[in-house]
Image (cartoon, rainbow, N blue to C red):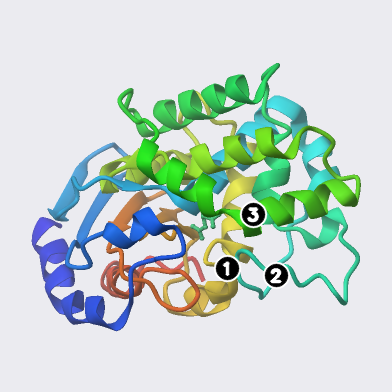
Amino acid sequence: MESLLNEILMQCASYKQQGAVASYIPELAKADPEQFGICVVEADGTIHTAGQWQSVFTMQSIIKPVILLAALMDSGEERVRQLVGMEATGKPFDAFNYSDQALAAGHINPMINTGAIALCTLIQGATYEEKFRRLLDLTRELAGNDRLQVEESVFQSEKATGSKNRALAYLLKAYGMISDRVEDIIDCYFKACSIGANCADLARIARGLACHDHSSLQPAHARYVNATLMTCGMYDGSGEFALNVGIPAKSGVGGGIMGVVPGRMGIGVYSPALDKKGNSVAGIKAMELLSQRLNLSIF
Ligand code: GLN
């Protein structure tokens, strides 16, 4: 497996030049586009790595499945369904454009920003600090890594520049979908996006979702999260990804991608140069090749 992973990184290396690191969060612009790492954790826990798999990057949207999971665990499926739906959006992750649709739960996917911001309200905790703490603890448990923490510089950078996410949260408030203070909710969301992790952390979280055997994970919740990843985990690139890779996955603008291969393995990839949709270019290629070589598509 290690030699296969090394071969894949070599074959996909040229794709790093085809993307650009995210710059709308200024701190993310400092990422080194040459970084490229991968980790596979098999069902029995065996770990395989290649490249810069130990480099730490911020999870960004890869925290969205964990937010959904926490909301399901803490508030139950019924309340989650009252707030967000399941359908693909075909739109960018931070789209404002709800013009032809009412802003209603059925049109909000938990894997886009609006959905994840809304779901922060359903995490257990008397304050948003407590809710964030609960989310961080769950992420640490799933990753089997107590040292996961917020990258403070990225958090501050997004907090200072995150007008669009703030606006999305106010939109939710205007439509009566959330009632708490927007600044508190948005701080929790920005902190969640700024949790630092490496490829092995992502692969371990994904292995739990793939195998349904983690003590903190009910199988029904894992199925819920995985189905949502399939509809929208790669945003408006989800259909293409389903065709070319064929596994539930989640990307983040930090350059990570987490892949869930049901019953078989979890995958973490990192390469910070992104395409226009905010997905890692070389990361997607690596997933494509791995899927072909190991016959991973669930279709
Ligand atoms: N923190 C980022 C944002 O809200 C996450 C987006 C992403 O990773 N696609 O804009």
Quadrant (top left/top right/bottom left/bottom right) for the N terminus = bottom left
Q: In the rendered structure, which disc, 1 or 2, sits on the residue that comes first in sequence?
A: 2
Mark 1 vs 3, N-terminal side: 3
Q: Secondary structure at mark 1?
A: helix
- 3D distance between C-alphas at marks 3 and 2: 17 Å
Which of the 4 image quadrants contains residue 151? top left
Tell me the amino acid under the disc marked 2: Thr
Residue on which the image places disc 1: 235
Residue at the spot of label 3: 165
| Percent x, y of residue 58 | 37, 47
Comparing marks 3 and 2, which lies closer to the viewer?
Answer: 3
User: Which one is earlier in the sequence, the residue at label 3 or at label 2?
Assistant: 2
Q: Residue 100 at x, y = what percent? A: 88, 77
Drawn side of residue 141 relative to residue 91, left or right: left
Q: Quadrant of residue 88?
A: bottom right
Which amino acid type is shown beneath numbered disc 1?
Tyr
**Disc 2 element:** loop
Q: Position of residue 196 (x, y in %)?
A: 35, 40
Distance, label 1 to label 3, CA atoms, is 16 Å
Q: Which residue is mark 2?
A: 89
Mark drawn on residue 142: none
Residue at the spot 33% in from the left edge and 23% down from the top edge: 146
State the SS at label 3. helix
> Which residue appears at 27% of the width and 58% of the height?
30
Amino acid on which the number 3 mark rests in the picture: Asn
- The answer to which of 246 and 148 lies nearer the viewer is 148
What residue do we see at 79% from left, 32% from top?
180
Residue 63, given in percent of the width and then of the height, sits at 50, 44
Near-viewer residue (261 or 191): 191
For label 1, count other residues whose C-alpha is less than 10 Å away and answer few (under 14), some (14-19) or many (20+): many
Q: Are the residues at dot 1 and dot 3 in contact (C-beta closer than 8 Å)?
A: no
